Amino acid sequence: MTTSYPERIVIDVTEGEFVDDDEQPTPAAPGKEKEKADTADGPGPAARAAARLTKALTTAAAAQARREYTALRDGLTVLKTETGAWASASQETPAHLRAHLLNRRYTTWLGKQKTEAEALEEKASELEKQARRAAAAGQGDDATAADHKQAGAAAATLREEAAAWRQRVREIHQQPYTGHIDPSDAELESHRRRTANRRRVGLATLLLAVGGLELAVGSLVLPTLTAAGLAITAWAKGRFPGWRRELPDVPSLAYEIADGTPAKDKKEKKDKEKEKEGKKKTEAASDPVAEDTLFPGDTGLPFPIHSVTDPAIAAACVGRALRAQQIDLAEITDTVRTSVGWSMTVTVASGDPADIDTDRNAAAIRTLLKLPRGGLAVECWSDASDTATIRVQTRPGFTDMGPVSDNPPLANSILQAGSFGQGLDGTELAFSLAGVMGFLVADSGGGKSSIMLALADWATSCHDAVVISIDPRGEGVEALGDAIQLAVSDDKHVLKTLDWLDRLCEGRTKLRKTLGYGKVWRPSAEHPAVIVFVDEWHDLPAKAKAKLLRLLRIGRKEAVWIIGASQFGTVQDLGSAIAPKMSLKMAGCCRGIDVTGLFGQGALREGYRADRLKPGTHTDPADAGTVYIQGLPGQRNRPMPWRFRHLTDSDATRRGNQRAQAGLPDLTASAAAAGLDWPALLVSLGARRPTPAPAAPGTGTGPVHVVATPSILDVIDAMDGERTIHTGPLLQRLAQARPEVYEGFTADDLDDLLAPYGVSARQARAMTESEGEKNRTGYYLDDLQSALDTDDEDDEDDLDEDDEA
């Protein structure tokens, strides 16, 4: 093997060039020779290289300084933001607040339990000491056998008592925790405020302590160290993002919700989690629709659900979205395709399933699944705190509701169920108004008037119900026209109507026993129910609200039923907590405080999210007519949207006119039996007298039998506009007009009829002179007409007193 040496390399020391054997160094330029030679007058190459290096180092140092300054400035901003967020507790999620609050309650309970156990243990120890002293007293030299026996018995008694106390201590330690109550949104916010206040006080105390120490020392050492520490901390937070504060994981509860026992230690919990993960992996390996093999090209991330048709894939899709929001999901079962999307049962391993429906989580889940706003509904189970039903809406709902049924006059009974709309899952919204005290809360544009009109439309088609409208604004359900037998809006007329209904309830209470009706009034064509629609409840005077509250208490059994509506649902607006008095409660688009005011605290977490509904406008109906309902007859409470069918005002007016022409249920006989005059009330309030209705269809009894009763209105009609009339001619006219009532009627009978109104016969001088007779008595038309307005004047005085108050 021949070894070849490498070619020799020659370096030109003057220029630093590489020169081959066959080459000669390149001659320097004339100027260069002079430069190299002139080392005494100017810098040489080494000096220039050093200058360049110095400049590069200076530039690099300046750039690094700018970077560190930027890091310091950013770190100060981060430190300020983190301190503010920590002090205000603004970043704590509802899940964190819930865990902290529940654990704090549990710790307080443990402290009380420990204090009680220590007291009992101390008492047991004292009893044992007394037992030892008693036993020792019986062992003395001068003790007799009797003393020894007595001391032994006393010591045994004391030891038994001590053992009983120690047994009580063991029972206390074994006692499960039973104080678990999921906090409401208001309690969580209150806990957030308390946490923030504690942190602010602690921070202020620390700053005052550090400042006081620095002032006490009187040296610059401590301020310098403090400033340096803050600067280093800020620089580190700006330089190393990993050093920045992050919200810790949601702490687990210190106790088991199911049985109230203390939570297992961390090792057991980790072992269980590992075992559960292994089980899940085993199941996923054998599952053809496992999350890692859902479809070709699946990335394992959440994906839109609108195109999914397989229930297993839909469940996996929702599961991924929930886990992306840190929901500790245990399983999803019972996935069912609905008319608008999907319904499934979700069970969480820890935490509260209501956390899925918080504003933040719900918005993020809707985005991941590409759902419309309002397309996610969570219904928490009342009998399982870790389970909820999730409804995913991928298609528009309420598309197959159909038109409002055109019910003929007198074709229905108030005891029957009317069909009013549909639930989001396609369930028919049908229920009876019999015995229903209802209340509706909805903002302007929420369809409140339309819902009330739909209910009144059904009621006016019944042969055994009379409809009354009370509305301070004069709108209400009056689109039904003459089918509404009495509509009042003036405050004094409202009060007079409510007083009359109160007297009707009292009269029916007595009459119910006479008729053998039992515990509740039985609506019929002769004795119809009275349904009072009260709109704009919040605008009523305080006295009217108080009278309505009394009717809510006594009216149900006497078939005087109230359905109210308001734009607000708080006690301040309604005058009292009326929600507990209502069997049917509905909430359209409104504020969250209105939802909890109507449905109770915790309603938002249970899924009654009427605050997310959108009010309609002139061009976009949005969610008008959509409500959440509690107390729906025949249905369990479900936080699911329901929508009422829309009845136009023109259709309502046409129907109302048809029903008025065909005849309306007459309350005259029923009111007279209770000692009241229904026609007189209508005339005094400016309402028309209703046309009596024929018998209900299918009864085969002919016209409804109305008991013939005398009335002050008959007297007014008999005067035929004359200012005065003698008693004799008046009796003749009454007998001719209604012989079945006034045949044989005497002057004394007429006096008895008019006496309750404060009207009596008196001498009429003008009549006596014109007739040429003396001492004749008669009646003035003005007296009769003013008698009907007496109650109105009393109501005006009551209103004036309220205003003064």
Image (cartoon, rainbow, N blue to C red):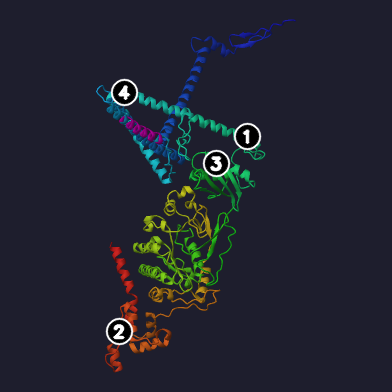
Q: Calculate the distance from the C-alpha at mark 1 to the C-alpha at mark 2.
A: 101 Å
Q: Amino acid at mark 4?
A: Leu
SS label for mark 2? loop
* Magenta portion: prevailing SS class: helix
Q: Quadrant of the N terminus?
A: top right
Q: Single out the residue that lies furthest toward the bottom.
A: 772
In primary-sequence order, the first of circles 1 and 3 is 1
| Residue on which the image places disc 3 | 322
| Residue on which the image places disc 1 | 282
SS label for mark 4? loop
- Whether residue 91 is visible, yes or no, is no
| Residue on which the image places disc 2 | 761
- Residue contact between numbered discs 4 and 3, judged by CB atoms under 8 Å: no
Q: In the figure, is residue 383 to the left or right of 144?
A: right
Q: Amino acid at mark 3?
A: Leu
Quarter of the image for residue 217 reads top left
Residue at 53% over, 46% down: 388
SS label for mark 3? helix
Q: Calculate the distance from the C-alpha at mark 2 to the C-alpha at mark 4.
A: 107 Å
- Residue contact between numbered discs 2 and 3, judged by CB atoms under 8 Å: no
Q: Calculate the distance from the C-alpha at mark 1 to the C-alpha at mark 4.
A: 65 Å
Q: Calculate the distance from the C-alpha at mark 2 to the C-alpha at mark 3.
A: 84 Å
- Residue contact between numbered discs 1 and 4, judged by CB atoms under 8 Å: no
Residue at 52% over, 71% down: 655
Crowding around mark 3 (Cα neighbors within 10 Å: few <14, some 14 to 19, many 20+) is many
